[in-house]
Amino acid sequence: MPLTPLRRFSRPNRRQALLAGPAAALLGACRGEPELPPIDARWVGATPVRGHRLRDATAGWPAAGDEKRVGAVVVGAGIAGLAAARALMRRGVDDVHVLELEDAPGGNSRGHRLGGIACPLGAHYLPLPGPQAREVSQWLHEIGLLKTEFGRTVADQRHLCHSPQERLFFEGEWVEGLLPPAAPGSATLTQYRRFAKAVEDAQRIGFALPSTRAPWTPAHAALDAVTFDAWLSAQGLSDAPLRWYLDYCCRDDYGADSRGVSAWAGLHYFASRHGFHAPGDESDAREGVFTWPEGNAWLVQRLAAPLGERLHSARTVLRVEEARDHVALAVHDERSGSVERWRAPLVVLAVPLFVATRLLRTPPPGLSEAAAALAHTPWLVANVLLERPLLPRPGAAPAWDNVAYGSTWLGYVDANHQSLATTPGPTVLSFYRAMPPAERMALLQASADTAAAHAIDSARDMHPELRLRVKRIDLARWGHAMAIPAPGVRGHAAIAAVRNARGRVRFAHSDLCGSSVFEEAFTLGHTVAERA
């Protein structure tokens, strides 16, 4: 659904009034359609003008003056950058400083507050780490989310997603889980089981999270060479509910559907984690996930806290130049408007690769080629403040993650799902949409009213009365939210070369694994710091 103007936002159309059912009385349908007050909609979060300052920058080095000399500089306070700073400090590197473009750390894991309720601006959960995510697991033990009891790893139940975890709005009612229902003996169930077998076969050749911990063989390269869509068709997996579900999973994790990601990426989603299980199989339970009202911002706060005043927000790095014995940086202070000079023996660029190419006066071999191999998908996140709960609909009870079958949106999560309050009250629903790269400019130019109208419209069938409950909508737009693991990305030689680069400038960003996943970013940041 492109971000084109919709109907007048302050007034529901007649179809909405008829669909509202019990809400019809509130609409005053018998007296015609009332004029509802406009919704307070506004943009929050990332500031595009700062990133564009780097794109449009033409100035050279700042004039001679005071130079900040420090032990190490990390550019970017996303998950990879914060993990790199943590690892450097643990290694005894003195005076580590982090420079962050925005006013708060976290990248696309930042959080927000709306009407006094915490909510996410981006990433909103973390699966329990698998055996290959050693660095993530160690850190979760340190902060108390995991502990060892009688030789077993146990998660803190207070932070695990409460049940019910997921539901799907399918053919007019809610059903448990996100996999469309399949009747016994149906063609859909047969296809589910065939795909489950394909995932089992893939697990035998080796998949892991982080992905760099798995082998890379000719079989992996063959999967990386074709789209997931083409691979599924070649396997005879054409059932509509199955294909919708697989497209949903790819859009959720990668920002693109099965036509845009490689077969390696599509299988990796399942084979590196919980597998795939058809309804009725013994192992059809979903894995546990950690989540909080503010999403992964809860984790960001704990990664960033040890930095204290060494985390410098509102700093746009304009230029990075590597010399024989140091690295020099030109940094624009967004608050004062001044340009600072920084100098350190080591710099970690924890930024997207296309940004790194603009920063470096002399890019290392392969960086430009690696950046050109990646496309990034824009995301729209709409946090909707409700003054009172939504009306019940047939089927499964309200869940944390709520998705409509067939929608171009990814559904919504309920910020208050983790609350233990016995009386329901105001809450925030966070709606997500991964958009095609071709719509990036439309997203940048869209008004908050237009974007908010699209979010409300995406829930029209699930909750016809939603417009009546809305008090305010805060929207976040991510122009380059995540890299897409398109065919050829995972096995790209130039990307691997940048990932393993040596020198005084190192690189740590989820771009280097072709997907924006917490475990990938954290491990890359930690590993770069360890090697340095």
Image: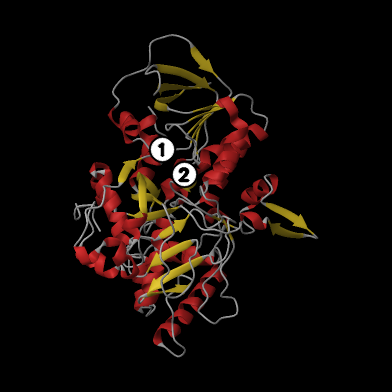
What residue does disc 2 label? Answer: 497
Ranked by sequence position, the earlier of labels 1 and 2 is 1
Callout 2: 10 Å neighbours few (<14), some, many (20+)? some
Give the side of residue 134 with respect to residue 435, left or right.
Answer: right
Farthest residue toward the top? 65
Q: Is residue 81 above or below residue 346?
A: below
Q: Label 2 near label 1: C-beta < 8 Å?
A: yes
x, y percent for residue 440: 27, 47
Name the residue: 64% across, 28% down: 93
Tell me the amino acid under the disc marked 1: Pro
x, y percent for residue 328: 46, 21
Give the side of residue 468 with respect to residue 290, left or right.
Answer: left
Q: Nearer the viewer, residue 141 or 509?
A: 141
Query: Can residue 366 be seen here?
Result: no
Tell me the amino acid under the disc marked 2: Ala
Q: Is residue 219 above or below residue 182?
A: above
Q: Nearer the viewer, residue 326 or 428?
A: 428
Q: Is residue 106 above or below residue 232?
A: above
How far apart marks 1 and 2 lie (CA) works out to 8 Å
What residue does disc 1 label? Answer: 365
Q: Is residue 511 above or below residue 177?
A: above
Q: Secondary structure at mark 1?
A: loop
x, y percent for residue 467: 31, 57
